[in-house]
Image: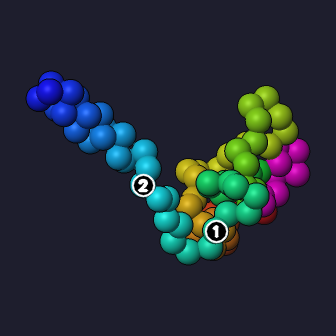
């Protein structure tokens, strides 16, 4: 009986974090995106904020790290020196 109770408590202890609610602070990303990126077109050298990481081998490359909100990404875009 003690083994069953101990196993149940241990299972609940490990499973409890998976039931935690994810809280978003700031502006929520559109369409389920979790990050915003600065993407630079390699042909025109112009940058834009995108909500999905550009695919490898395409004509867009990521500048810097991912940002949690669109406002953070816009601020980084304004401060970036590599974009025209």
Q: Residue at x 56, y 74 (%)?
A: 26
Can you identify the residue that label 2 sits on?
A: 20
Q: Position of residue 45 (x, y in %)?
A: 81, 52
Helix, strand or loop: magenta stretch: loop
Quarter of the image where the N terminus is located: top left
Q: Residue at x 83, y 48 (%)?
A: 41
Residue 32 quadrant: bottom right
Crowdedness near tag 1: few (<14), some (14–19) or many (≥20) residues, C-alpha within 10 Å: some
Determine the CA span between mark 2 and mark 1. Answer: 18 Å
Q: Which residue is mark 1?
A: 28
Q: Earlier in the sequence, mark 2 or mark 1?
A: 2
Can you give x and y, in whole percent of width and height, for residue 69 in the image? 60, 66
Left or right, 71 with reference to 8: right
From the viewer's side, name the closer residue of 10 and 51.
Answer: 10
Q: Quadrant of residue 58?
A: top right
**Residue 5 visible, this orientation:** yes
Which class describes the residues within 10 Å of circle 2: few (<14), some (14-19), or many (20+)? few
Please provide percent x and percent y for residue 3: 15, 25
Q: Quadrant of the C terminus?
A: bottom right
Magenta stretch: includes residue 23: no
Task: Tell me residue 80's x, y (percent).
Answer: 63, 63
Part of the protein shown in magenta: 41-48
Seen from the viewer's position, the closer of residues 74 and 82 is: 74
The answer to whether residue 10 shows anywhere in this view is no
Q: Is residue 82 above or below residue 13?
A: below
Residue 76, by quadrant, is bottom right
Say which residue appears at 22% left-offset and 38% top-offset.
9
Which residue is painted at 65% across and 50% down in the image? 63
**View extreme (left): residue:** 2
Q: Secondary structure at mark 2?
A: loop
């Amino acid at each position: 009986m003690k083994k069953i109770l101990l196993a149940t408590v241990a299972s609940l202890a490990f499973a409890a974090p998976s039931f935690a609610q994810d809280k978003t602070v700031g502006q929520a990303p559109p369409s389920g995106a979790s990050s915003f990126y600065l993407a630079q077109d390699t042909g025109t050298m112009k940058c834009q904020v995108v909500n999905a990481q550009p695919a490898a081998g395409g004509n867009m490359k990521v500048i810097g790290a991912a940002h949690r909100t669109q406002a953070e990404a816009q601020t980084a875009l304004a401060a970036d020196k590599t974009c025209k």
